Amino acid sequence: MLRWLKDFRFAAVLILAVVLAATVQKYTLGAEQYNNFLIFRASFGHLVSNLNLYAPFPSEHLDLFKYSPTFAFCTLPLAFMPLWAGTLVWNLLNAGVFIAGIWVIGGVTIHGVAVQEQQESQSRITAIMLWICAVELLTSTQNFQSNALVAGFAMLAVGAWEREKAWQAALFLALSFHIKIYGLAPIALMVLYPRKGRFLLGFSAWLLVLTALPLLIISPENLLWQYANWRELLRSDHAASYGASVMSILAPLLPTVRSVSALQAASLVVQCAPLAWLLLRRKSPEPLKRLLLLASMLLWMVIFNHKAESPTFVIAVAGVALWYGMQPTSSTWLRYGLLWFVLVGTSFSVTDLFSPSLRDSIFVPMNLKVLPCIAVWCAIQWQIWRLLVNDSPSNFATGTHFDG
C-alpha cells in the first residue's frame, strides 16, 4: 500500500474521486452549501444584462461577487450547464489545475537526478506533495472556492519559466490576476529568469486580451463602469476584516486600516528583498533556490492577506509542500517538526479530527490556523538569506528523503 501512496497517478485519481464525492455530498445538502458557486454562476447573467456585478443579489445568492468582469465572462459555460453538472465541472477544474501545477513543479525539484530515475522520482515527490495538500484542497473545493486555481496557475507559471516558455508563464499569471488580484504576486519571480522582455510583452498582450474579453457582449462604457464598481468594492472590502492572517494575530497592535497596510507593505519588502539582492548582484540562482522563493511567495500570499480564510490556505500549504520537498535530509527536526505543525495546526485543526470545543472555541476564533504557516515562512527567510549571504549552492535532497 505504501508503494501506491508514493505513485502520483494513484494519489491524483484518489484525490479527484474524493473531490467528486465531496461535491455531490455538498450539493445534496442544499444551496447554502454551494453559495460561492451560485455567485460565480450568476455573474455571467448579470454581466450580459448590464447589471452591477458587485451589487448584492439576495434573491439569487448570499455575499458579493468580488472578481473581475473577465472572470464573470468566463463563467459562461457554467451559466448554461445544469446546476449539478456545473458544480462538478467547477471543482474538477480547480482540483485538476492544482494537481497539474504540483506535477509540473515537482518536475523541477528533481534537478540533478539521473535521467533514468527522473520519472520515478517525479512521481514519488509529487505524490507526497499532493498528500500534504489533500486536506486543504478538499476544504477549498468543498467551499467551491477558486483558490486551488490560483495556486495551480502560480506553479504552472514558474514551471513554464523553468522551461523558458515565457508566453505560457505570462498567460497563467494573467489568468490568475483575473481570478484574484493577489494571484499576480508571483510575477515578482520573473527577475530570476532570462527573457524578461519577452515575458513582459506576453503578459501585456494576454492581460489586454483577457481584459477585453467582456467587450464581446457589453459596451466599452459598461466595462469601464464595471471596473469602477470593482475598485469601489475592493476599497471598502479592505477595512472589513483581518482574515486568518498575521494581522489577526497582531490585531491589538493594528488599530487602523493604515497600520494593516503598513504591515503588509513591510512584509512585501521582506518577501522581495532576496529578489532585489539577486537582481542587483546579477546572480542567477539554481532551480531549487528559485523554487524556495516560490514556496515563500505562496505562503506570503496567504499569511499577509487581510481576507484570508480557511479555504485560502490551499495556496499556503502548496508552498509548505514545495518547501518540504526541498529540505536536506540532515534537517530532520526542522523538516518533520514544521510539517507536522502545519498538518495538525493548519490542516487538521478546522476538521472533525479536532474536538468541537477545541476547534470552535480556540482555533477558529483566534485564527490559530495561520501560525504554522507563519513559522514555515520565517524558516524560509532564514534559509534563503543563509544561502544568499554565504553564496553557497543549495544542499537540497531533490526528493531523496521520500525513499524511506
Image (spheres, helix red, strand yellow):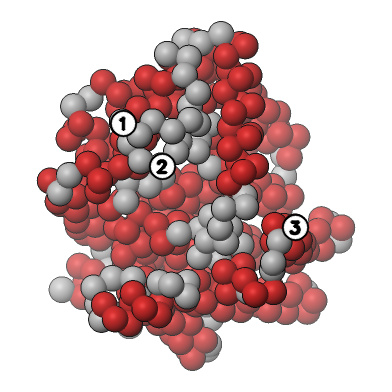
For mark 3, what is the residue?
Answer: 258
**Crowd tier of the residue under label 3, counting other residues whose Cα lies within 10 Å: few below 14, some 14–19, many 20 or above:** few
The residue under label 3 is which amino acid type? Arg
Q: How far from the left and from the top, in percent, is residue 192?
A: 71, 53
Verify CB contact (< 8 Å) between mark 1 and mark 2. Answer: no
For mark 1, what is the residue?
Answer: 60
Furthest-right residue in this view: 280
Verify CB contact (< 8 Å) between mark 2 and mark 3. Answer: no
Q: Quadrant of residue 211?
A: top right
Which residue is at a point 30% across and 24% down the rendered structure image?
79
Tag 3 or tag 1, which sits nearer the N-term? 1
Please say if 369 is above or below 328. Answer: above
**Crowd tier of the residue under label 2, counting other residues whose Cα lies within 10 Å: few below 14, some 14–19, many 20 or above:** some
Tag 3 or tag 2, which sits nearer the N-term? 2
For mark 2, what is the residue?
Answer: 63
Give the quarter of the figure containing the N terminus: bottom left
